[in-house]
Image (cartoon, rainbow, N blue to C red):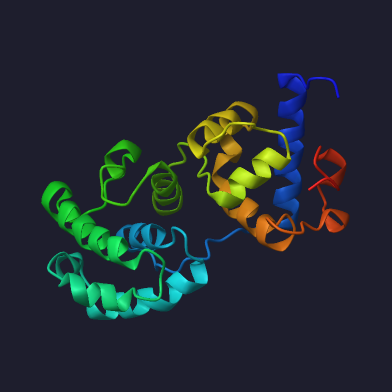
Amino acid sequence: MARESLKAKRERALAVCERMAEHYPDPRPQLQFGDDPFRLAIAVLLSAQTTDAAVNKVTPVLWERYPAIEDLAAANLADVEEILHSLGFFRSKAANCIKCAQMVLADYGGEMPRDIDEMQKLPGIGRKSANIVTSIAFGDVRGIAVDTHVFRIAHRLKLSNAKDPSATEQDLLKVIPPELWGGVNIRWILFGRAICSSQRPKCGECFLADICPSAGKC
């Protein structure tokens, strides 16, 4: 197969985004957080290596017990661990929740920082998480959050061959127009769950099959 030019790859990436938008016209995050940026950050923190559905089962209990940032900052670690026990890596997540609340109070006056670099200073918040929070909570799209779904789909579409999420994001930013970055993560997650799953992808049902180099080969 001939090497694809950057221009051709950008045209194909645009077609991917357009079709995704047609199939998922109103993408919404699956995590439940109300309209509180801090609660969104905690939900995203908790979602690592765990399903959104599992997170949505524990966060109502967490916020009932600790309704304010001050409450969570002063929480007993063992009590938070008990609430999060059903989640993977619940001990480290519990510790990060408390530390995150403490840092938001001490360093940012109780308000989530809006800057993506400042946000990444919070315990448990990496670039992927910061991308999600800044985009959803503040409408400030600075990049593309590359989770396992986005990473898998980007590679199957041959839009990246990078070995890690950070480099994969940079590849995607080069071929997807900035005005479309905001919708990529949620739409690709929905697509990954419904069609392009890690095991047994439904290539025969895929609306991207004709522009996907991996169609029928996964």
Residue 119: image x %, image y %?
30, 44
Any part of residue 66 in sight: no
49 shown above or below 120? below
**Residue for point 76% across, 47% down:** 19
Considering depth in this image, is 72 or 138 the residue closer to the camera?
A: 72
120 shown above or below 162? below
117 shown above or below 90? above
Any part of residue 205 in sight: yes
The part of the image, by quadrant, that contains residue 157 is top right
In what quadrant of the picture does the N terminus appear? top right
Side of 7 where 67 appears, left or right: left
Side of 108 where 181 appears, left or right: right
116 shown above or below 25? above
**Residue for point 37% across, 45% down:** 126
Side of 63 where 197 appears, left or right: right
**Residue for point 26% across, 48% down:** 122
Side of 145 where 84 appears, left or right: left
Residue 27: image x %, image y %?
60, 58
